[in-house]
Amino acid sequence: TRSDLAFRGPSLNDAGHVAFLGAGPFRRPDGASEEATAVFAPPGDGSGGLGVIAMTGDPIPGSPEGLRLRNLLPPHLNNHGDLVFLASLRDADNDPIDADRDTALMGYVDGELQILLREGDTAGIVTPEGQLDAKVIDEFFVDRPLVFSQRFAAPAQLSDIGAVAVSLIFAAGAGGVF
């Protein structure tokens, strides 16, 4: 243990693996040390142990705009070692981006970090009548700001079959858990 680190929001799966959020001084691969928040979990390569899955300031792989992670919320780990977490985003220069597109549901699936859903995306929702309705995601509903403080329950859940549950609010004003 280190006294200069803070740990929050552990998620434990049936295999005894844990994922959590940590904040403190971290050393980047280039040797630079900085205050950051990171998601820790078993790496997807099957090597065991814990690794940094995502850290504030990191570029998001495959992001056409060169987006970077800004703030992270606690992850949820399933029994296959995949996880989900919410993150706020910055541009490639670490500057703010359009507030209508600055939060994303991130996934770490089969060892790859990716954006699963983002504010401004269109989601297909099945109505009570069984019809498919396209809705624009206005925001992810969380009961706290996207900062490392306050309560720390994972705001999104991931099942063992890959289904994600998350609270959404749509541009038209409706919302719920999907």
Image (tube, rainbow, N blue to C red):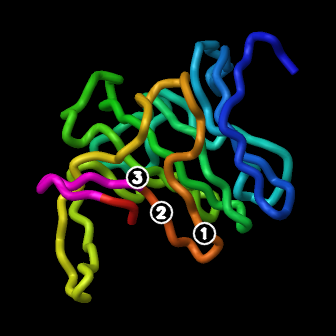
Q: Which mark is residue 165?
A: 2
Q: Is residue 57 magenta?
A: no
The reply to whether the C-beta atoms of the residues labelled 1 and 2 are less than 8 Å apart is yes
Binning the other alpha carbons within 10 Å of mark 1 as few (below 14), some (14 to 19) or many (20 upward) gives some
Q: Residue at x 57, y 46 (%)?
A: 154
Q: Residue at x 64, y 22 (%)?
A: 23
- Comes first in the chain, label 1 or label 2: 1
Disc 1 secondary structure class: loop
Q: Which mark is residue 62?
A: 3
Image height of 99 relative to 83, above or below:
above
Q: Would residue 167 be found to the left or right of residue 64 on screen? A: right
Q: Which mark is residue 159?
A: 1
In-front residue for pair 35/3:
3
Q: Position of residue 131 (x, y in %)?
A: 20, 86
**What is the spatial separation of the Cα atoms under label 2 and label 3, in whole angstroms?**
24 Å
Magenta region: 167-175
- The image quadrant of residue 51 is top right
